[in-house]
Image (cartoon, helix red, strand yellow):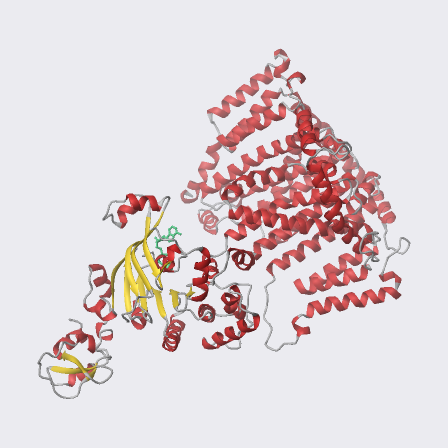
Amino acid sequence: MVEIASPIAPIRRSVSYDPVIIALLGLAALLCFAKPILPDFLIRVPEAWVPPLANWLDTFFEFIKGDLDTGRPGLIHLTRWFAEGPLAFLLGVTANLLEGKHRWPFFDPLPWSTVAAVAAVIGYYLGGWRLALLGGGTFVWTALVGQWKIAMQTLSVLAVAAPLAFLIGLTLGIMAWKWGWFERMIKPVLAILQTIPFFTYLLPAVIFFKVGPTAGAIATTIYAIPPMVLMTTLGLKKVAPEIIEAGKMSGCTRLQMLFRVFIPSARTEILVGVNQVIMLCLAMVVLTAFIGMPGLGGKLLAMMNSFKLGRSFEIGVTIVLVAITLDRMSKAWVVKLPVHHERGTPWHIRHKYLVMAVAAFVFFLLLSQFVDILDKVGRKQSLSMGREIDTVIKGALAIDAVKSVTETIRYVLNVWVLIPFRNALLWIPTPAFILVVVAFAWGFGGKRPALFATAFFTTVAFSGWWDRSVITLYSVISAVILSVMIGVPLGILASRSKTWATRILLVCDTAQTFPSFIYLLPAIMLFGVSDVTVVLSIVIFTTVPLTRYTIEGLRNVPAEMTEAADMSGATRRQKLLNVQLPMALPTMAVGFNQAIMFAFFMVIIAAFIGTQDLGQELQRTLAGTDLGKNFVLGMNVALMALTFDLTLMSWAGKKNKMLGLSAR
Amino acid sequence: MSTQTPVIRCRNVWKLFGANPEQYLKTMPAGRSYEDIHADGYIAGVKDVSVDVGRGEMLVIMGLSGSGKSTLVRCFSRLHDITGGTIEVEGQDVMALSEKELIELRRSKMGMVFQSFGLLPHRTVLDNVAFPLEMRGQNRHDRRERALEVIKLVGLEGREDYFPRELSGGQQQRVGIARSLAIEPDIWFLDEPFSALDPLIRREMQDEFLRLQEMLGKTIVFITHDFDEALRLADRIAIMKNGAIEQCDTPDQIVLKPRTPYVRKFTEEIEKSRVVHAGVLAKPINGTAVEGDPVAGDLTIHQLARQLVGDTRDNLPVAGKDGALIGVLNRQTALDVLLGDG
Ligand SMILES: Nc1ncnc2c1ncn2[C@@H]1O[C@H](COP(=O)(O)OP(=O)(O)O)[C@@H](O)[C@H]1O
Ligand SMILES: [Mg+2]
């Protein structure tokens, strides 16, 4: 096994016995042992030392905000103008067309059957019968279960936010590609934007853009911009040099180059960006429920709060169907390539899909004038079985066997694992905690991540929210550990057979398109509203990327390596432990990192179930105007998340380089 | 070749790649070799090149991969800004052109064909060919008319509505050629246009290309790394190595009188009799007694082989195109070339 052992050996050795780590951990242990005799300021940063950052930020925001009542100049005049002018107009138009809101152009809402028919034609155009069925079916289901109105409320915001995010992302992406300094400046900003909790966007959106759809649309838009920027820049950079030269030799001006050569040639990446924009927008627009936006998310939140499991389940299905439809269709669009028509093909054949869509639209529009059920499905007519499902679920959960299982899990987790773990973390003196985190960052990531970890966690310590940050971290860590225990074995098992690997990957990919809010549902169903539910919803959410990347990592181990192991007579187990897992580890680390990022995201959302962490406080700020506090809380989440991100990505990068694999 | 001002006139042109090439070239001591420059952290893409391209001439640039062929041609069309020297196209200093003038020059005078075609994937054949016309703002009808004309010229009739990925490599390159001809350029650049194609198709495309050239009579700069291709097409060949032109001459001269060891090595494998023409080998008559029927000066020695072997004369008269005598061919010299010891 000489030839395969050599590249793998360094992995094991690289982490251990670094004197710096020993020193850091030793010091941390010392602080813990000496806790009884430590002065108070070494256990927690005293209140008096906490700089009034929130107040400073408040003053600062107040300054740039300006005042509408007194007319003091500031940003708010601009943002409110935008919110009440163009944005409100656009939202009004989509809301009128889709749900019949009383806005210009004052039409009746589109009959549901027309929307479903056009969706089916679009699906057929993009991906044949299967997508037609998916597209049409989703809307038929939505109408029949009586969720048409709330679904259209959600989609009418999406229909404005997604194009807006696309345009802004595209513009910023072009700028980043054009000017290196701009790219260098915007990259870290985007990284931070993606780790700040969504709730931190919501409050400023509400303050600057007015409560209601406008604020929801803005927060959603901003959250969806980063991937569009990155994909645009990537696509433009990849345009082949000869295509660029051909454009120049054809005498293109700069603008012609950009619009006729670069952007069309970067089509694939830009469309992948569009897919990501749409999916992120959907995930976020559902979350605007927390600032009282009506729609699928709002309804789901209300139903979950009143523990109506049947209706929650139905809404969950709708959201999932909408997500899958949007994802599959936009992905089909990415790979859809134009095909020529023979000479002399008549116009209506060349544009047969357009003709079909218009025909279907007109047909159902007329038909629905006479057949009411094709226009609106009333409350009484809907096939919703919310109550029945509710009874079934609650009945099933009340069965003694089921109940004893869930109760046991809850009890064991709570009493033996979660609570002791949480108390232990809270018991550790702040400086010792920071030292351990820095040791972790040093050991895995190296010097740079360690420096950032020091700065970031010290900032958190001095933010005045240490305990809540630790509780947040506790939920994240315990959930991720649990999901590692589920996801990694699942991935290993699945990757034993090709067909299973493909199947599970498909499931994971599909599950990753679901809006995060959905993941709360099964946890709440099983465990009601409790501490365990928070952790378990994170577990479900984070198991997906872990499984996915485990399979990916194992699948991409070069065949020569596994064959070499086979030839050296390794057992399956030896092969797994000595060859496959070490080679797959960097990829798995990416999955692990994604799991942690997802966990930070979820823990904040799940806070409405009732936690004592940062999310709880964050949600509380949504009701007020405490911008400063809102930002400090969001910043704490972002700083902790970034520490993990920097450390793990640096580790994965180093390992990939060492193993001679390309970075993913 | 003509005696008028050359179409492209290029003097002591340098193109260096690296951190600060202008500054480096200014302070560089004369006579630094390619390797010296490389050691200083720069790559000499084009190294002190002076060459002219006459009107209607076909100059073939050849050399190994990385010898700077593409870079030199991209300097002609100012896809690259040169580091030193001057390039004049139709008497205009290209480096002095404003962006607008440069675009105008490319829109009206230059066409270029690329090795991997450089077609726009989202446009049909017709729209790809019409692209340069569209860029200069020609109306849709004229554009279409002209594009169809060149598509027919390159033999792609009936494929106007196809997308590039629906075509074979040879067909794609025909689209590239049609596009470069759409604006009726005076100067035609072709950067290894056939090297991405299969040998059989390549041969076919070369014939096609010769047909086009005969018909259009353009000034051409043609890049290849294939010597046979160069010999087949060229009026003159420029052989490049490490950014510099080793020798620029007619094919006959290159094989008969290689100026550097590198060129000699390059030409060693070539069957000279297929390259050298009787007219080139002919000496001035200067009182030599000649008799009998003259041989045609534009035939290669290889084509005259049968006659040369069978003939009994020591010296054969050689006639030019118009039938007038242009010199005498020493039979022994010609036979030496034929047998490869010339
Ligand atoms: N944009 C560039 N930046 C740096 N080096 C380049 C660039 N373009 C070409 N070169 C270098 O210049 C040399 C000549 O390249 P090129 O003209 O493409 O060769 P050829 O066409 O003869 O194969 C090569 O060594 C190549 O690496
Ligand atoms: Mg080249």
Q: Does residue B337 show up? A: yes
Q: Is residue B14 found left or right of B131 in the rendered image?
A: left
Which residue is drawn at the image coordinates 25% and 49% (left, top)? B33
Image-based side of A657 in relation to B300, left or right:
right
Q: Quadrant of residue B196?
A: bottom left
Position above or below: A433 against B189: above
Ligand 1, by image quadrant, is: bottom left
Q: Report how many numbered discs are placed on residues in the image.
A: 0
- Can you give x and y, in whole percent of width and height, for residue A284 in the image? 71, 44
Q: Nearer the viewer, residue B157 or A663?
A: B157
Q: Quadrant of the N terminus of chain A?
A: top left
- List x then y, in percent, for residue B110: 41, 65
Q: Position of residue A440 (x, y in %)?
A: 54, 29
Q: Whole-percent x and y of residue A493?
A: 60, 46
Q: Nearer the viewer, residue B118 or A62?
A: A62
Choose top left, top right, bottom left or bottom right for residue B91: bottom left
Compared with A542, B174 (above or below) is: below
| The residue positioned farthest toward the right in the image shown | A380
| Residue toward you, A348 or A63 | A63
Q: Depth check: give the residue in front, A338 or A221.
A: A221
Residue A504 visible in the current orientation: no
- In this view, the residue farthest toward the bottom is B292
Q: Quadrant of residue A455?
A: top right
Q: Which residue sits at x=57%, y=36%?
A: A645
